Image (spheres, coloured by chain):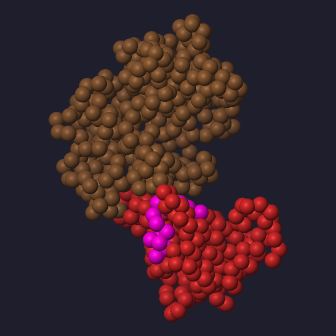
Chain colours: A brown, B red
């Protein structure tokens, strides 16, 4: 089959590799019909994520048709499914509590060592996201082996376009959980840093959960426009002093809840960010967390901090004093995708949530390296690249 | 018995040098000068886990470095285990103590390539299932240098015990052992 493989920083290629096979009873093989490039794939592309190996197949947002099933899979050949990016067993204590991204059995035993050392505990497996998260081959390929297929994938009714449901795999539930973690109360003002896909879905979700106002912060005009379309007020941090603007817009109180959906590659020329960049490049620090610092400083006293953004390592200059003195609450974590799928599929079917607005580019899988370059170089206009194996080059 | 434990923490986490001796003296015919322990909570009843473990022929299904376990009759078994550099080490083991659904203790017989002894305990944990704790005392092959070499080849007993217990949990809870291999050929290479 053809698959998009990582070969190093800014070096991804479509290679021919062996097709996946059923290895365990609960496996299924999916023939991919749509797969997206995620903002977090750019962290791999930029070489920020350790434990990558040359030849690793990327991609954790994908859907397709079931073409083969193991003896214990509950899926049937021919079904269309969206696959969660988190690989969770459904049988352990954490899965029982619907904390799927904390699944204890999703990672191969040997791969659990790294997270155990770094985080104290191993996490669930992830598709196409380094060997620390299992070394599983990802979905930017023609076929994927999906473990625990009786638990993760959700079956999509006939007649519903791929484009409407593809983002159930990651970014829609991630944006939804981000808003849920902000514990929004009616009348709240919520500030969202980063208007990438997760931020934009968080904006929509926050309104659905009863937020009165959402203030979206970014520096890409096109992305701010999209946020505005959903009813958010916007701040372009390149043109505006963000903290001062937030204080004026909230009568000095600050947002009741803040959501950091930027994460470890925060852009922009702030002194702390530049220092972070130097430290990251010299391995003195691994994460560049300007947005979370700003969010904590702006958040109202007793407010809530939600952090869907991906961080992998350590930070310094975390405003621990502000966090303590203001009595803030922080909720975060990789998304418990499986928990949110049925409800969010319903919301899509009932047209309560729109996801298709996000797709700016549809490319053939063979054009995936171009997709990465475009997404990396032009985040203003390239909001989401969807790869479709067999689409052809005309698109 | 030198009593090194002054708190309630498990012996294997002690920083005192006498901890291994304290542990082996709590066993029948205990032996081995290095100690390692690992606990894992498994979402299954203790009786079921104990029964699977006590059938020693099952152990190679999740103990990756065990080549074979052959019954010798009575409470004795012969173990062949992978060692660094493509070699194997062997010993006879004898069950020294067992309480159904609760614990199994063993010790190696004279002439073992790697002297070892230990105890595996199954403790009911209510709604969370069962806490399975393995405590193993052993003589690192070739002393400190041998331990370093074994670690480089990922066959250090502490590393193996940790990974074996994870695989045991996976097999018991999910009915299979997680792998990120993509093809049968890759899986065979991984398990070789």
Determine whether, in the image, residue A37 is placed left or right of residue A252: left
The residue at the point 39 percent across, 52 percent down is A90
Q: Residue B171 appears at what percent x and percent y?
A: 43, 65
Determine whether, in the image, residue B158 is placed left or right of residue A40: right
Quarter of the image for residue B81 reads bottom right
Q: Residue A30 appears at what percent x and percent y?
A: 28, 49
User: What's the magenta region?
Assistant: B39-51
Residue A375 in sight here: no
Foreground of the two, A107 or A275: A107
Residue B156 inside the magenta-drawn segment: no
Image vertical order of residue A240 relative to residue A168, above or below: above
Q: Residue A35 appears at what percent x and percent y?
A: 32, 38
Quarter of the image for residue B7 reads bottom right
Residue A138 in sight here: yes
Q: Residue A200 appears at what percent x and percent y?
A: 41, 23
The residue at the point 57 percent across, 7 percent down is A251
Residue B50 inside the magenta-drawn segment: yes
Foreground of the two, A381 or B62: B62
The residue at the point 32 percent across, 57 percent down is A27
């Amino acid at each position: 089959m053809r698959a998009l493989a990582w070969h190093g920083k800014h070096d991804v290629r479509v290679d021919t590799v062996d097709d996946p096979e059923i290895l365990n009873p609960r496996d299924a093989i999916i023939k991919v019909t749509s797969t997206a490039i995620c903002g977090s794939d750019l962290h791999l592309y930029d070489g920020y994520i350790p434990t990558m190996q040359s030849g690793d197949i990327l991609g954790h947002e994908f859907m397709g048709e079931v073409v083969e099933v193991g003896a214990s899979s509950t899926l049937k050949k021919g079904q269309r499914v969206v696959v969660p990016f988190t690989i969770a067993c459904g049988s352990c204590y954490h899965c029982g509590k619907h904390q799927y991204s904390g699944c204890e059995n999703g990672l191969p035993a040997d791969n659990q060592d790294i997270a155990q050392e770094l985080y104290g505990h191993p996490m669930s497996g992830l598709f196409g996201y380094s060997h620390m998260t299992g070394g599983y081959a990802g979905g930017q390929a023609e076929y994927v082996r999906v473990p625990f297929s009786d638990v993760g994938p959700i079956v999509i009714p006939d007649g519903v376009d791929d484009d409407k449901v593809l983002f159930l795999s990651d970014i829609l539930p991630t944006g939804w959980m981000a808003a849920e973690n902000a514990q929004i109360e009616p009348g709240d003002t919520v500030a969202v840093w980063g208007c990438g896909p997760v931020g934009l879905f968080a904006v929509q979700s926050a309104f659905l959960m009863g937020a009165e106002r959402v203030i979206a912060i970014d520096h890409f005009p096109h992305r701010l426009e999209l946020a505005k379309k959903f009813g958010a007020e916007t701040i372009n941090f390149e043109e505006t002093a963000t903290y001062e603007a937030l204080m004026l817009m909230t009568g000095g109180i600050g947002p009741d809840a803040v959501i950091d959906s930027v994460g470890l590659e925060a852009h922009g020329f702030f002194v702390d960010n530049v220092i972070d960049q130097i430290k990251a490049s010299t391995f003195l620090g691994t994460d560049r967390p300007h947005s979370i610092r700003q969010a904590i400083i702006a958040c109202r006293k007793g407010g809530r901090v939600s952090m869907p953004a991906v961080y992998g390592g350590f930070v310094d200059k975390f405003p621990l004093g502000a966090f303590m003195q203001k009595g803030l609450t922080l909720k975060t974590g990789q998304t418990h995708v499986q928990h949110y799928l049925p409800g969010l599929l319903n919301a899509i079917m009932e047209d309560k949530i729109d996801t298709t607005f996000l797709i700016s580019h549809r490319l053939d899988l063979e054009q995936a390296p171009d997709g990465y370059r475009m997404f990396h170089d032009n985040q203003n206009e390239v909001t989401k690249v969807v790869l479709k194996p067999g689409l052809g080059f005309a698109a | 018995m030198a009593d090194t434990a002054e708190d309630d923490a498990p012996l294997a986490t002690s920083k005192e040098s006498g901890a291994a001796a304290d542990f082996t003296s709590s066993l029948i015919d205990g032996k081995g000068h290095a100690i390692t322990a690992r606990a894992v909570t498994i979402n299954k009843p203790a009786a079921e886990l104990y029964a699977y473990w006590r059938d020693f022929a099952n152990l190679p299904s999740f103990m990756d470095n065990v080549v074979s376990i052959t019954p010798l009759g009575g409470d004795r078994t012969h173990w062949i285990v992978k060692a660094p550099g493509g070699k194997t080490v062997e010993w006879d083991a004898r069950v020294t103590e067992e309480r159904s659904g609760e614990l199994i203790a063993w010790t190696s017989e004279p002439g073992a390539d790697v002297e070892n002894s230990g105890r595996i305990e199954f403790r009911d944990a209510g709604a969370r299932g069962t806490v399975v704790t393995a405590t193993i005392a052993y003589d690192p092959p070739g002393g400190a240098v041998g331990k370093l070499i074994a670690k480089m080849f990922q066959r250090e007993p502490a590393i193996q015990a940790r990974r074996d217990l994870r695989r045991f949990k996976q097999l018991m809870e999910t009915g299979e052992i997680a792998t990120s291999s993509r093809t049968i050929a890759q899986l065979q290479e991984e398990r070789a």
